[in-house]
Image: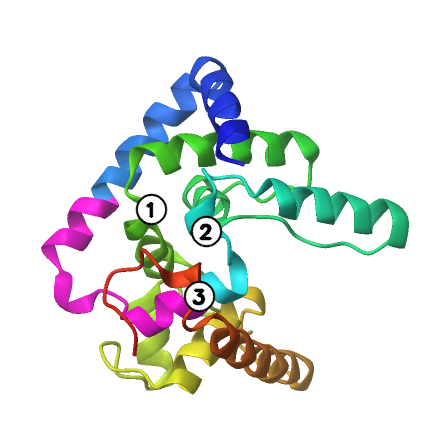
Amino acid sequence: MKQCASLVRWASSCLLRREWEQLRLVVHGLVAASAADPANEPPWIVQAFLISGEDHRFFRHGGIDVLAVCRAVWRGKVLGRREGASTIEMQLVRVLTGRFEPTFARKIREAGLATLLAASVAKSQLPALYLRVGYYGTNMTGYASACLRLGFDPRNLTSREAATLVARLKYPEPATRSERVSKLISLRTAHLLRLHADHLGTVTYCSLPGGVE
């Protein structure tokens, strides 16, 4: 998988040089801000739930999860079911560039920039960076804002609080209460708790700073 990412990274460094230079400045600004504010770093448990739910092969790819891409294509073509294959790097690129158009060209550009991001920033720093800027719902842009709105202690979340927070990255909470979205968040929370239990003691979190809970 990392060999494929290396090829994409080489092509991207040529074709996306201008876009990458702009994005690189933003990313390294976030890294510097994170280093200057360690007290508000999302704790290990939240980063672990993010990896379990969004990208469980995170530490085994170079920005693109080839297995997830192949599975998504197969399920889309054979079963007619849409399935995402975005890595944490790709999701971070999407948020920072503000590009959300549902086009193949955007996905290709996003994948290319993700490989450059993975080579530019330590993998162990990326989950926290994404959590810091992710969109969790109305008036909940960024980890600190989401914790404040939900009444969570940002430095000391329980497993369930961490799961319900990360669930909102997939199902952002609207300004007006929605029974449908609330149910989706609840189901996603339960799913994340099961995934986390399965991943404890495996290589899923092997390089994540902070150790186990």
User: Which residue is disc 2 drawn over?
Assistant: 58
For residue 144, side relative to residue 74 (left or right): left
Instruction: State the image quarter where residue 183 is shown.
Output: bottom right
Instruction: State the image quarter where residue 146 is shown.
Output: bottom left
Question: Which residue is outermost to the top?
Answer: 14
First in sequence: mark 1 vs mark 2 = 2
Q: Are marks 2 and 3 in contact (CB under 8 Å)?
A: no
| Image vertical order of residue 40 relative to residue 207, above or below | below
The reply to whether residue 33 is in sight is yes
Q: Which colour scheme is used?
A: rainbow
Query: Residue 145: horizontal and vertical position, in percent?
Result: 32, 70
Q: What residue type is labelled 2?
A: Phe
Query: Residue 151: horizontal and vertical position, in percent?
Result: 33, 86
Residue stretch rendered in magenta on the structure: 30-49
Q: Residue at x 57, y 83 (%)?
A: 190
Q: Which residue is drawn at 39% across and 26% down?
A: 20
Task: Tell which of 28 and 136 is nearer to you.
Answer: 28
CA neighbours of label 2 inside 10 A, class few (<14), some (14 to 19), many (20+): many
Question: Please, what secondary structure does the residue beneath circle 1 have?
Answer: helix
User: Which residue is disc 3 drawn over?
Assistant: 202
| Quadrant holding the C terminus | bottom left
Q: Which residue is drawn at 61% across and 34% down?
A: 106
First in sequence: mark 3 vs mark 1 = 1
Q: Which of marks 2 and 3 is in front?
A: 3
* Spatial separation of the CA atoms under disc 1 and disc 2: 8 Å
User: Which residue is disc 1 drawn over?
Assistant: 123
Q: Is the magenta stretch mostly helix, strand or loop?
A: helix
Q: What residue type is labelled 1?
A: Lys
CA neighbours of label 3 inside 10 A, class few (<14), some (14 to 19), many (20+): few
